[in-house]
Amino acid sequence: MVALIVILFPPMVIAFLLIMERVEEPLRRPTSPREVAEFLQSASPGEVDTLAASGIRRAMARWRRRRRSRVQQSTEPLV
């Protein structure tokens, strides 16, 4: 049992670190001034509330999700 733990522990730690790197990557990317200006022009009231309550990072994430879903809906072919 100990040998199994010794063999499996290092690959599991490496896998965890790789997953965490993917999670942290969007958090490291700063928000550009152009994105902030576009956000302020087109933000919904809920996104402005998120900005006031939680800060710019969470509000920008919510705004990006909304924009991304809108783009996906507009690119779907009409049947």
Image (spheres, helix red, strand yellow):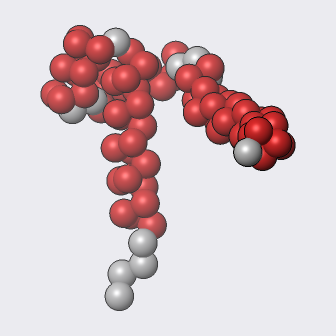
Q: Is residue 12 left or right of residue 42?
A: right
Visible in this render: residue 37?
no
> Of residues 65 and 10, which is closer to you in this image?
10
Q: Is residue 14 left or right of residue 52?
A: right
Image position, residue 12 (x, y; %): 72, 40
Rendering quarter of residue 26: top right
Farthest residue, direction bottom: 79
The N terminus appears in which quarter of the rendering? top right
Q: Is residue 56 left or right of residue 54?
A: right
* Residue at 58% in and 33% down: 23
Farthest residue, direction front: 1
Q: Is residue 42 above or below residue 58?
A: below
Visible in this render: residue 4?
yes
> Of residues 45 and 53, which is closer to you in this image?
53
Q: Is residue 64 above or below residue 24?
A: below
Q: How many marks?
A: 0
* Residue at 67% in and 36% down: 16
The C terminus appears in which quarter of the rendering? bottom left
Rendering quarter of residue 67: top left
Image position, residue 50 (x, y; %): 24, 21
Image position, residue 4 (x, y; %): 78, 46
* Residue at 76% in and 39% down: 2
Rendering quarter of residue 36: top left
